[in-house]
Image (cartoon, helix red, strand yellow):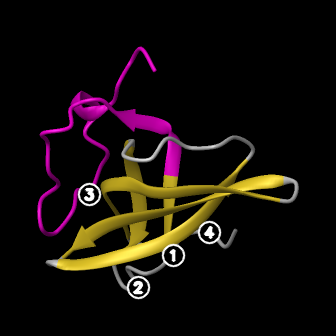
Amino acid sequence: MKSVEKPTLYSIGIVKESYAIIGYFAYDYIYTYKNKLYKKTGSSNKKQDVGKRFIVKFSKENPVNSELILTLPICDTTLTAPELGWKKIPKYLICLDY
């Protein structure tokens, strides 16, 4: 995967679909920035649960360039990201017992 261009921002990404491909799993996720919805596809070595929320890292200059960070799950399903994202990952969002 191409690395996310700097400067980077963070938001909340939600897994919308997860499916098996030969040799790996793919998933579609969504996030918003400046009130625009972005939908991207990622891949991993295990199936992702639909509806799970994770930190998403994206380029401020090119928001379509993003990465869902599967090691940073968000437990609170009521939280929303600010319209302009976060400059740093808010540690209070991360689920410690994932």
Residue linked to disc 4:
3
Disc 3 target residue: 87
View extreme (right): residue = 23
The secondary structure type at the circle numbered 1 is loop
Labels 1 & 4 near each other (Cβ < 8 A):
yes
* Amino acid tagged 1: Glu
Image coordinates of residue 13 in percent, x first then y, are 36, 56
The amino acid type of the residue labelled 4 equals: Ser
Disc 3 to disc 2, C-alpha distance: 15 Å
Q: Amino acid at mark 2?
A: Asn
Task: Judge from the rendering whether residue 2 lies leftward or rightward of residue 92; answer left or right.
Answer: right
The CA span between labels 2 and 1 is: 8 Å
| Residue bearing the label numbered 1 | 5
* Mark closer to the chain start, 3 or 4: 4
The mark that comes first in sequence, 3 or 1, is 1
Q: Can you say whether 90 is above or below 25 in the image?
A: above
Q: Which mark is residue 62?
A: 2
SS at mark 2?
Answer: loop
Tell me which label, 2 or 4, sits earlier in the chain: 4
Asked whether the residues under the numbered discs 2 and 1 touch, taking CB atoms below 8 Å apart as contact, a structural biologist would say: yes
Which of disc 2 and disc 3 is earlier in sequence? 2
Please tell me whether the stretch drawn in magenta is mainly helix, strand or loop: loop
Q: Residue at x 36, y 54 (%)?
A: 14
SS at mark 3 in the image: loop
Amino acid carrying mark 3 in the image: Lys
Q: State the CA–CA distance, disc 3 to disc 4.
A: 17 Å
Instruction: Give the residues in magenta.
Output: 69-98
